[in-house]
């Protein structure tokens, strides 16, 4: 007879009911995101640019850490590369040709460092939303 010990994603490896510090990271980043979004309308225009950068970064980190914990390292790396690359590609296409969103541009001095003329925070915004959208789509697909 053999005994197999389950140590998958929902196993109780911690020896108790309290989640580890690392397991709390997605929730921590999500709460930071919500808190910053509450403050955003109260800030002046200069503060809003900084808050926008912080909100997108916190939301992206919430998505990234949740994916890492629930899907694993390689899935998360693949998701991040695909969603960041897709977001960057669409934005480069959009700012250079006007397709699919019409004519627009970004002010790099406001939104930070750029990649191919696109502020780095913009592909992060695409990625931050792609993961929750995937989760909602999968949940609705099961209903």
Image: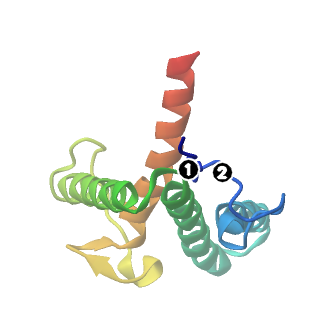
Compared with 20, 103 (above or below) is above
Q: Would you say the residues marked 1 and 2 are in contact, meaning their CB atoms lie under 8 Å apart?
A: yes
Compared with 127, 39 (above or below) is below
Compared with 130, 125 (above or below) is below
Q: Quadrant of the C terminus?
A: top right
For label 2, count other residues whose C-alpha is less than 10 Å away and answer few (under 14), some (14-19) or many (20+): few
The residue identified by callout 2 is 11
Give me the residue at 55% from left, 47% from top. Answer: 4
User: Viewed as shown, does residue 45 lie left or right of 97?
Assistant: right
In percent of width and height, residue 104 lies at 31, 57
Give me the residue at 47% from left, 48% from top. Answer: 131
For label 1, count other residues whose C-alpha is less than 10 Å away and answer few (under 14), some (14-19) or many (20+): few
Q: Secondary structure at mark 1?
A: loop
Q: Secondary structure at mark 2?
A: loop
Residue 132 location, quadrant: top right
Tell which of 52 and 7 is nearer to you. 7
Q: Residue furthest front?
A: 1
The residue identified by callout 1 is 8
Give me the residue at 40% from left, 63% from top. Answer: 73
Q: Residue furthest right?
A: 17
User: Viewed as shown, does residue 93 lie left or right of 76?
Assistant: left
In percent of width and height, residue 39 lies at 78, 68
The way the protein has been coloured in the rendering is rainbow
In percent of width and height, residue 67 lies at 50, 55
In percent of width and height, residue 40 lies at 72, 66
Q: Residue furthest left?
A: 97
User: Viewed as shown, does residue 13 lie left or right of 102?
Assistant: right
Return the mark for residue 140.
none
Tell which of 88 and 17 is nearer to you. 17
Give how far apart the Cα atoms at labels 1 and 2 are.
5 Å
Q: Quadrant of the N terminus?
A: top right
């Amino acid at each position: 007879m053999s005994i197999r010990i389950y140590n998958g994603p929902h196993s109780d490896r911690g020896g108790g009911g309290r989640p580890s510090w690392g397991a709390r990271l997605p929730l921590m980043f999500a709460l930071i995101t919500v808190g910053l979004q509450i403050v955003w309308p109260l800030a002046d225009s200069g503060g809003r640019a900084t808050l926008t950068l912080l909100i997108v970064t916190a939301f992206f980190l919430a998505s990234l850490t949740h994916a890492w914990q629930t899907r694993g390292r390689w899935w998360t790396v693949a998701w991040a590369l695909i969603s960041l690359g897709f977001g960057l590609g669409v934005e480069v296409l959009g700012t250079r040709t006007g397709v699919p969103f019409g004519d627009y541009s970004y002010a790099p001095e406001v939104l930070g460092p750029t990649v191919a003329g696109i502020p780095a925070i913009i592909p992060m915004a695409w990625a931050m939303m792609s993961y929750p959208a995937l989760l909602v789509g999968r949940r609705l697909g099961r209903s």
